[in-house]
Amino acid sequence: MTHVFESCAPLAQSHDKDYRPPTCGYADPRPAPPVVRSVGQPTAGLVRFAPRDIVFCHGDRVDRMYEILAGTVILSQALDDGRRQIVEILGAGKLLGLPAGGFHTSTAEALSDVQARVVDLKSLHRSAGLRRRVDEQMREQIAAMYRLAVLLGRKTAGERVASFLASLVHDPSCATAHGRGTPLLAFDFALADLADHLGLSVETVCRELSGLKRAGIIAQPRPGQLAILDAERLADHAQRALPPKSYPASQARIRMPRRSKDTLS
C-alpha cells in the first residue's frame, strides 16, 4: 500500500502537481525595470516578481543582472516536448543573470514573491567588489554542477530527495531555528519543481517524502514549511560524498590497476 505525504498537496499550497512552466516562446511585453542612481552603490533599481513570473528566458540577451533581496528563483532548461530540468535554485543574496557569453543559458522563474535590485552591467567595469562576487558565484556554480551530475547520474530516488533536503538545512535563505534547534525550512517548492530538479516523477517524489515522514525524519508543521526532525539520519539517507579532506589518509589515494601487456598504452 502506497502512502502519500499528506496527499502531497500541502507541500506547495498554491501550486498543484500538474503545474507546467510557462513557455518562453514570446517577446516579453513588460517594460524594462526603472533604473535609479544611489550614492555609494552601482546603478540599480528595485523590481518585484510574483510567484511563477518569468524573469528572463533561455536565449534572451543579457542586458542586466539582478541581486535577489528576498524570495527564491529557479533556473531551468526545457526540451521541445516540455520536459524540464531545473539546474539551479537561487535565494536571497545571490546574483541572477550572470553575463556569461552574452545570452542567458536558462530560463529564470520566480518560485515565490521575489524582490530584487537591478544591477547595470556597466557596474562590472567600475566595481571591483561586484566583479569578485560574480567570480565567487561562478565558482560556486561549477561546484554545484558537479554535485548535480553525481546526484542525477549515481544516486537513487531516495538519496536524491534526502540530498536536496539536506542541502536546504545549510542554506541560510531557507533554514531557521525551530524549537530545540530543529531546522525549519521555508518550503515553496511544488512537487513538479522537485521532480524536475531531481530527475524523478511527481509520484516518486511524493512517495519518498512520505517515507521520510513515516520514519520520523521530517514533518510539516504547516503548509509552506518543513521541519527536519533528524538531520543526522537525513544525511545518512542522502549518502553524500565526503570532500577529499574528510577521508582517512589510508583512503585518500585511489589505487589504479596494474597495467598489463594486454591493456592499451
Image (cartoon, rainbow, N blue to C red):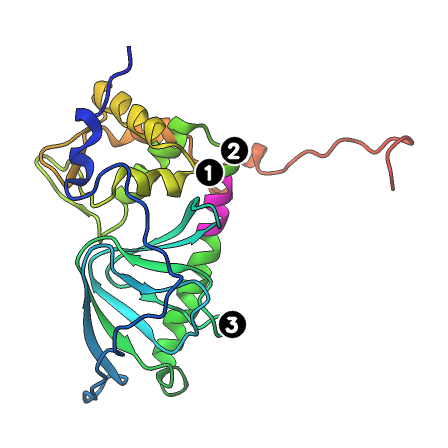
Q: Are marks 2 and 3 in contact (CB under 8 Å)?
A: no
In the picture of the structure, the residue carrying the numbered disc 3 is 101
Residue 173: numbered disc: none
User: Which SS type dominates the magenta stretch?
Assistant: helix
Residue at x 26% of width, y 63% of height: 93
Residue 233 shows up from this direction: no
Q: Which mark is residue 151?
A: 1
> In this view, which residue lies farthest toward the right?
261
* Drawn side of residue 253 relative to residue 264, left or right: left
Residue 162 relative to residue 83: left or right: left
Q: Residue at x 32, y 45 (%)?
A: 20
Mark 1 crowd level (few <14, some 14–19, many ≥20, 10 Å Cα)? many
For the residue labelled by badge 3, is the local secondary structure a helix, a strand or a loop? loop
In magenta segment, residue 238: no
Mark before the other along the chain sequence, 2 or 3: 3
Q: Nearer the viewer, residue 217 or 243?
A: 217
Q: Is residue 184 left or right of residue 149?
A: left
Q: Secondary structure at mark 2?
A: helix
User: Measured along the vertical axis of the image, is residue 62 above or below residue 251?
Assistant: below
| Gap between marks 1 and 2 measured at Cα | 6 Å
Q: Amino acid at mark 2?
A: Arg
Dot 2 crowding, Cα within 10 Å, few <14, some 14–19, many 20+: few
Whether residue 196 is visible to the viewer of this picture, yes or no, is: yes
Q: Which residue appears at 19% of the width and 72% of the height?
A: 47
Q: How many marks?
A: 3
Measured from the top left, where is residue 248 in percent x and y?
A: 51, 34
The magenta segment is: 144-150
Q: Amino acid at mark 1?
A: Leu
Q: Is residue 145 magenta?
A: yes
Q: Do the CB atoms of the residues marked 1 and 2 lie less than 8 Å apart?
A: yes
